Amino acid sequence: MLGYSYKMMNLDDILKARADSFDLERGDQLAAIQEVLNEKYLGRVRAKKLQDGLLSISTPSSAVANDIRLRQVGLIKRLKKFEITEIKVRIE
């Protein structure tokens, strides 16, 4: 033996570890954030990423991007349960 220690993992442990790596809770949060965004910008914006308080949003419209930037403080207040501190808007 070369001094390596191997642990056999059962299939349930492997699948749970893989599911945890996808961070499914964050996906649920993005879906809830998207619902809030749809109230004002239906079909014009997409919540892309939420990480460390930074929400990334994309939109094809520069006018919508500017509107989001102007309303950023209000949006952050509406989304406070998600602990968002900043919104980044990309035009795509």
Image (cartoon, rainbow, N blue to C red):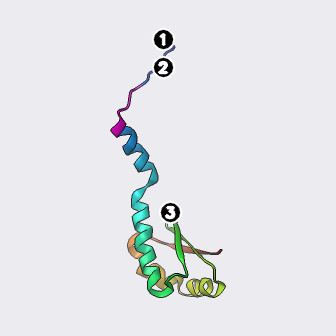
Q: Write the residue at 44% across / 21% down.
A: 5
**Image check: 2 left or right of 64?**
left
- Please name the amino acid that badge 2 sits on: Tyr
Q: Residues within 10 Å of mark 3 (few under 14, many from 20)?
A: few
* Residue 33 x, y percent position in the rendering: 44, 74
The answer to which image quadrant residue 16 occupies is top left
**Image check: 79 left or right of 63?**
left
- The residue identified by callout 3 is 52
- The residue identified by callout 2 is 4
Of residues 29 and 53, the one drawn nearer to the viewer in this rendering? 29
Tell me the number on the disc at residue 1.
Answer: 1
* Residue 47 x, y percent position in the rendering: 51, 72
Which circle's residue, 3 or 1, is located before the other in the chain? 1
The residue stretch that appears in magenta: 7-12
Q: Is residue 47 magenta?
A: no
Mark 3 lies on a secondary structure that is loop
Label 1 and label 2: CA atoms lie apart by 7 Å
